[in-house]
Amino acid sequence: MAVLSASASATVMLMILSNLIYVIFSDPICQPTYPPDAIPVYEEDRDLLQFAENLEFLEAEFFLWGALGHGLDGIAPELAMGGPPPIGGQKAKLDFLTENIITEFAYQEVGHLRILESTVGGIPRPQLNLSAPNFASVFDAAFGYALMPPFDPYHDSLSYMLASYVIPYMGLVGYVGANPIINGYQSKRLLAGLLGVESGQDAVIRMYLYERAKEVVHPYHHTVAEFTIRISELRNRLAMCGIKDEGIIVPLELGAENRTESNVLSANTDSISYSRTPGEILRVVYSSGDEHVPGGFYPNGANGRIAQEFLKKP
């Protein structure tokens, strides 16, 4: 191995020091610049992002309870802003890998609530129903008959990840839907950052389930792939705006470039994420198919101006 001479070593050290001095004193621009008259957050941005807080509360509470056995009140109670504790949350029986994944998701959601509150103002945590019977109702509706025994999201790791399939995707498509009508530069940065993490969470969940696609979910005699397909079909029916949701296995006509039946990521014919409006999202998470009729995960309805306006209408 070649050894540098003393003079060569000195030269190398001088170059390194010169570069360090340049970085320290050159005042590099590391953040984007905005026009001096740009508006950070528009009022309509605030409404849209506060609507999204409803979904972030749902994810935060479900993941916190599933991984840690307690919810937001045990981690950051101030973020709940006096809203009632969720119904039916409990610690799930998770293996080491799954618990690590869900623990990370849980703390990510706490961060999302914190940045949303500091940027656009918080809303009180809505009443949430995280009970096993509520999830059982969702899966019964997906299959068209009552599963026996009733589906329990907290029973084991696979059950919990199937239940998790129900939730983050709605935040993902909601952020994609809000993106074109967000105006403020700070709002856009926040939405993009939230969308990136929500998309990542959904991808992890889908990959976890895709690896087990042919596995039968005992004691129901349906495969993991069938579970995802049924849940996606249910959400499409409830939202009533065409196909914007797909399971982990699809017919070729719905696959990427019509050439794959694998569907690790749900996307449209151009392989870009689907989008949904607030009304569509409420129809799904209320389990009612009607944005004016609360239920499901939000027995008393969601909070914020957009959701509350729907509740005021017949």
Image: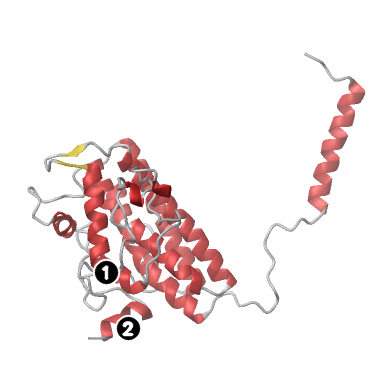
- The residue that label 1 is drawn on is 240
Q: Position of residue 239 (x, y in %)?
A: 28, 68
Going by the numbered disc 1, the residue's amino acid type is Met
Residue appearing at x 46%, y 67% in the figure:
116
Q: What residue type is disc 2 on? A: Glu
Residue 36: x and y in percent read: 70, 76
Give the label on residue 309, or none.
Answer: 2
Q: Indicate the quadrant where residue 233 lies.
A: bottom left
Q: Nearer the viewer, residue 97 or 228?
A: 228
Q: Quadrant of the C terminus?
A: bottom left
Residue 167 location (% of width, % of height): 31, 57
Closer to the camera in the image, 300 or 307: 307
- Residue name at image x 86 percent, y 41 percent: 18
Position of 146 relative to 277 (above/below): above
The local crowd at label 2, few if under 14, some if 14 to 19, many if 20 or more residues have their Cα within 10 Å, is few
Relative to 168, say whether 190 is above or below.
below
